[in-house]
Image (cartoon, rainbow, N blue to C red):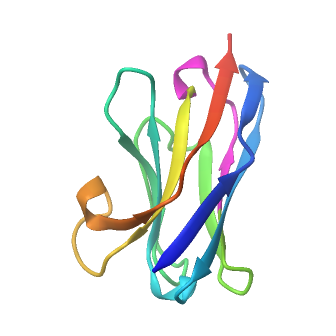
Amino acid sequence: QVQLVESGGGLVQAGDSLRLSCAASGRAFSNYPMGWFRQALGKEREFVAAISWSGGNTYYADSVKGRFTISRDNAKNTLYLQMNSLKAEDTAIYYCAAKRDGGSYYYTTNYIYWGQGTQVTVSS
C-alpha cells in the first residue's frame, strides 16, 4: 500500500506559477512510476504528466507540454509538478497516482494508488 498526499494548490492569476507536491508513504515510492491527473468540474479525469520510477522518462499531455514539468525525488519520497504560465483552463482538482508495472502511462486504469487531490484555480 502507498499513501499519497498532494499539496501546493491554490488560487492564482493567469500567467502565474504553482508547484504541486505529492508526499508518499508506505511501500517503496521509488518502485513506482508516477503520474499527475486532473479533473475539472463536470469533466472526466484526464492525464497531465507522468514519470518513470527512475525519473529518466517523462510524458506530458499536449495541453501542458512546455508549461508543466514533472519531477521526483526518491530520497524524499516526493513527486512534483511545476506549473508555469497557468491558464484558466488548467483549473481543476489535481491528483497524483502510483502506476502499476506495465501498461500505458496515459490511462487512469493503470494507476493503483491515488491521493485525495488538491484544488488549483486559475482566474483570468
**Could you tell me which residue is drawn at 54 percent across and 51 percent down?**
116
**Image quarter of residue 85:** top right
Residue 12: x and y in percent read 77, 25
Q: Is residue 20 magenta?
A: no
Question: Can residue 71 be seen?
Answer: yes
Whole-percent x, y for residue 114 in the image: 45, 60
Residue 36 lies, with reference to residue 26, above or below; the image says above
User: For the N terminus, which image quadrant?
Assistant: bottom left
Looking at this view, is 53 or 10 the one in front?
Answer: 10
* Residue 85, magenta (yes or no): yes
Instruction: Give me the residue at 54% from left, 36% from top.
Output: 93
Say which residue appears at 67% left-offset and 79% top-offset: 77
Spot occupied by residue 23 in the image (x, y as percentages of width and height): 67, 68
Q: Which residues are magenta?
A: 80-90
* Residue in the image at 78% along x and 29% along y: 16
- The x, y position of residue 120, in whole percent, is 64, 32
Residue nearest the observer in this picture, 122 or 43: 43
Please say if 54 is above or below 49: below
Q: Specify the quadrant that holds the C terminus.
A: top right
Quarter of the rendering containing residue 18:
top right
Relative to 77, does residue 51 appear above or below in the rendering?
above
